[in-house]
Image (cartoon, helix red, strand yellow):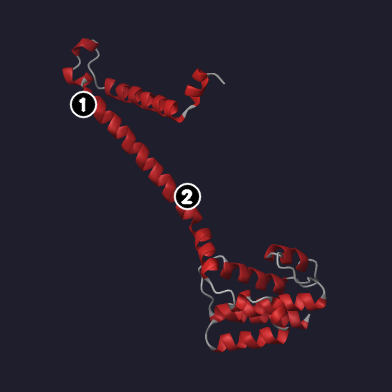
């Protein structure tokens, strides 16, 4: 690549071009209000260095505002993901929904779910029902435990079952609780409990 082409591809050169185009646009806008007779009739301050400096300052202020606005939009889009990442890093490793399923049996998870429900901790109560479902899938051989398996993979596996809807309810509730700052309510827990009862009955 030649030196000339590199200079034309550089950020400084492109910013210079953008500034020049803005200056030309600025001059065009003001020329509409100028007398049509001749350029000589323009006021002396029209070509003033102060006016050019003000135009450059206005240009860079507009650029700064645009960059700030775009940055704010990106932050709004990424904020839920950043929040869930920091929450997962700050949570204790032995939180109910994060205990490896092999540590408790299905009945153990169900007992723990009832305990959290009595305490009014519906989030953890729902998580325990989710873990009881995973343990049940493991015990039946439908989906043996794999640490790397995601909810999406579980969802694809249960779609092949005769009644996938209750599994889907528990999986989607787990997704919602894990990846948002939404708190679970008693109605959320009742929905999960009903879904688990349907799994037991199937």
Q: Whole-percent x and y of residue 39? A: 24, 12
Q: Which mark is residue 50?
A: 1
Dot 1 alpha-carbon crowd within 10 angstroms: few under 14, some 14 to 19, many 20 or more: few
Relative to 58, residue 182 above or below: below
Above or below residue 151? Residue 31 is: above
Residue 34, given in percent of the width and then of the height, sits at: 24, 19
Side of 113 where 46 appears, left or right? left
Say which quadrant the N terminus sits in: top right
Residue occupying the point 81% across, 72% down: 142
Please tell me which residue is depicted at 79% across the width and 80% down the height of the picture. Answer: 202
- Give the class, few, some or many, for how many residues have Cα within 10 Å of label 2's Cα (few <14, many ≥20): few
Q: Which label sits on residue 74?
A: 2
Q: Is residue 190 visible?
A: yes
Q: Secondary structure at mark 1?
A: helix
x then y, percent, for residue 54: 24, 30
Q: Secondary structure at mark 2?
A: helix
Establish if 9 lies above or below 77: above
First in residue order: circle 1 vs circle 2:
1
In contact (CB < 8 Å): disc 1 and disc 2: no
161 with respect to 55 (left or right): right
Q: Is residue 12 left or right of residue 180?
A: left
Q: Residue furthest left?
A: 44
Residue 63 position within the rendered picture, expressed as x and y whole percent measured from the top left: 37, 37
Question: Residue 129 lies in what quarter of the image?
Answer: bottom right
Residue 192's disc number: none
């Amino acid at each position: 690549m030649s030196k000339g082409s590199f200079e034309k591809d550089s950020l400084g050169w492109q910013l210079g071009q953008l500034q020049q185009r803005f200056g030309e646009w600025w001059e065009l806008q003001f020329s509409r209000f100028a007398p049509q007779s001749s350029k000589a009739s323009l006021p002396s301050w029209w070509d003033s260095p102060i006016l050019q400096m003000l135009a450059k300052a206005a240009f860079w202020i507009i650029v700064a505002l645009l960059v700030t606005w775009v940055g704010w939009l990106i932050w709004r889009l990424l904020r839920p993901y950043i929040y869930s990442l920091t929450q997962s890093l700050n949570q204790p490793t032995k939180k109910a929904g994060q205990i490896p399923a092999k540590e408790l049996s299905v009945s153990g998870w169900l007992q723990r779910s009832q305990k959290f429900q009595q305490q009014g901790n519906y989030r953890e109560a729902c998580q325990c029902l989710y873990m009881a479902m995973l343990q049940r899938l493991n015990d039946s051989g439908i989906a043996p435990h794999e640490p790397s398996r995601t909810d999406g993979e579980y969802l694809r596996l249960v779609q092949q079952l005769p009644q996938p809807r209750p599994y889907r309810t528990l999986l989607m509730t787990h997704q919602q609780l894990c990846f948002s700052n939404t708190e679970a309510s008693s109605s959320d827990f009742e929905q999960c409990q009903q879904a688990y009862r349907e799994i037991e009955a199937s």
